[in-house]
């Protein structure tokens, strides 16, 4: 599958919000005639809890389609993509860090990452260790994920997310449990990996934002 060049949202709104669309008239995402996310752009999408941040990520990742309007990925309507096409997108185009992180608690941090990396052999073990080191959790590589703090789990889950090819990086509140120092380290890692791929970065936030240069900040 050709790597999509852009994401286009047209008049999109979660069906759960359909009864009161006027509440979202000020949104810079919902109900916009055209909203584009282009290669190389970095976006911070801010909203209070319940504003639809996780819903938006789920739509862009193809996990849900309970929205009005349309979503175009590359030159294809997202609703017309087959299961096989979505699988290929998630394998080689769209990398996604969900809020719940999805780590297996009984596996070590490294085992969780290797489980993902085996799908594409995108990173060597040394490269994975280097990313863990930048994120400040290299010393925890052999510790079960369930024994890590939430902030440590976030950093391990981020490294796992980066262990695949991607042109679009979706991050749902990736630094919500990190202090300023850890946030900066993680932001530098994301900047490096996304810049190398000219990838689109879309990160949601409730106030603790990624520290990326040149971000477009949008209200949901």
Image (cartoon, grey):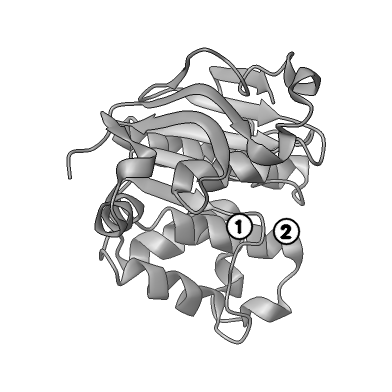
Residue 81 x %, y %: 30, 46
Q: Residue at x 29, y 65 (%)?
A: 124
Disc 2 is placed on an element classified as: helix
Q: Which residue is mark 1?
A: 155
Residue 160 x %, y %: 47, 61
Q: Quadrant of residue 22?
A: top right
Q: Which residue is mark 2?
A: 151
Q: Residue at x 74, y 49 (%)?
A: 178
The residue lying furthest to the bottom in this view is 106
The front one of 13 and 220 is: 13
Left or right: 17, with 133 as reference point: right
Q: Residue at x 66, y 54 (%)?
A: 99
Residue 52 x %, y %: 70, 38
Disc 1 is placed on an element classified as: helix
In this rendering, is residue 111 above or below 166?
A: below
In this rendering, is residue 1 above or below 217?
A: below
The residue lying furthest to the front in this view is 19
Left or right: 186, with 6 as reference point: right
Q: Residue at x 55, y 84 (%)?
A: 107
Estimate the spatial distance between the alpha carbons at disc 2 and disc 1, rounded to whole Å: 7 Å
Q: Quadrant of residue 75?
A: top left
Q: For residue 185, say whether it is visible.
A: no
Left or right: 146, with 106 as reference point: right
Q: For residue 176, say whether it is visible.
A: yes
The front one of 131 and 64 is: 64
Please rate how many residues cluster around mark 2, counting C-alpha atoms within 10 Å: few if below 14, some from 14 to 19, many from 20. Answer: some
Please rate how many residues cluster around mark 1, counting C-alpha atoms within 10 Å: few if below 14, some from 14 to 19, many from 20. Answer: many
Q: Which mark, residue 75?
A: none
State if disc 1 and disc 2 touch (CB < 8 Å): yes
Q: Quadrant of the C terminus?
A: top right
Q: Quadrant of the N terminus?
A: top left
Residue 162 x %, y %: 42, 53
């Amino acid at each position: 599958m050709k790597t999509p060049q852009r994401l286009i949202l047209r008049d999109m709104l979660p069906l759960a919000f359909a009864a009161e669309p006027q509440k979202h008239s000020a949104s810079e995402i919902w109900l916009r005639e055209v909203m584009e996310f282009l290669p190389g752009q970095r976006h911070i999408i801010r909203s209070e809890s319940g504003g639809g941040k996780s819903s938006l990520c789920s739509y862009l990742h193809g996990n849900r389609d309970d929205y009005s309007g349309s979503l175009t990925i590359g030159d294809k309507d997202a609703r017309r993509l087959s299961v096989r096409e979505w699988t290929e997108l998630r394998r080689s185009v769209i990398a996604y860090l969900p809020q719940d992180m999805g780590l297996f608690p009984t596996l070590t941090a490294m085992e969780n990452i290797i489980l993902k990396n085996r799908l594409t052999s995108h990173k060597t073990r040394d490269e994975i260790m280097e990313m863990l080191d930048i994120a400040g959790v290299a010393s925890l590589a052999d510790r079960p994920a369930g024994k890590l703090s939430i902030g440590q789990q976030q950093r391990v889950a981020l490294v796992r997310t980066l262990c695949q090819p991607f042109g679009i990086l979706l991050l749902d509140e990736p630094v919500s449990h990190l202090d300023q120092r850890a946030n900066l380290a993680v932001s530098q890692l994301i900047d490096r990996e996304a810049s190398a791929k000219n990838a689109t970065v879309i990160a949601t936030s409730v106030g603790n934002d990624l520290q990326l240069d040149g971000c477009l900040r949008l209200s949901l």
